[in-house]
Amino acid sequence: MSSKLFEKFVSSRHIIWKRVFDYSRTPVLWKAVWENLAIADFLMCLYLFVIAGHDVAFRGEYIRHDVSWRHSWQCTFAGMLSTLSSEASIFIMVIITVDRYVD
């Protein structure tokens, strides 16, 4: 699991780096769209890091930490990252799909 998580982290950073510093013929608007999609994927990667870290910490005894975890700021932050990333990705993919359909 950690290798796939690391792979997603590296690929998201690579896409952000390539899109920000690649001055090709891609229109500026589409660069911004792809950058935002990469950032949304990066936020999901951060969410997975938070969940993986707490999975390791609670290994085998989650039930003891259930209530304290669900009321902690880390759980709230992880939920915010997950929701923001998912909603942003869906919204951006809808924009891309509509543009491809219209053109």
Image: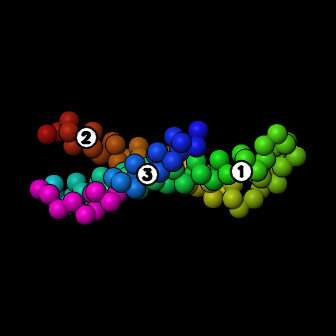
Provide the residue span drawn in magenta.
16-25
Alpha-carbon neighbours of circle 2 within 10 Å: few (<14), some, or many (≥20)?
A: few
- Residue annotated with mark 3: 10
Residue 58 makes an appearance in the image:
yes
In the image, taking residue 92 as reference, residue 9 lies left or right, namely right
| Gap between marks 2 and 3 measured at Cα | 29 Å
Asked where in the image residue 19 lies, by quadrant, the reply is: bottom left
In the image, taking residue 46 as reference, residue 19 lies left or right, namely left
Alpha-carbon neighbours of circle 1 within 10 Å: few (<14), some, or many (≥20)?
A: some
Q: Identify the element where label 3 is drawn.
A: helix
Extreme residue toward the right, this view: 64
Could you tell me residue 10's position as x and y percent? 43, 51
Q: Residue at x 54, y 42 (%)?
A: 3
| Gap between marks 1 and 2 measured at Cα | 39 Å
Mark 3 or 1: the one toward you: 3
Q: Which residue is drawn at 34% across and 57% down?
A: 16
Is label 1 in contact with label 2 (beta carbons under 8 Å)? no
In the image, taking residue 87 as reference, residue 32 lies left or right, namely left
Q: Identify the element where label 2 is drawn.
A: helix
**Quarter of the figure with the C terminus:** top left
Extreme residue toward the front, this view: 3
- Residue annotated with mark 1: 54
- Residue annotated with mark 2: 98
Mark 1 or 2: the one toward you: 1
Residue 23: within the magenta? yes
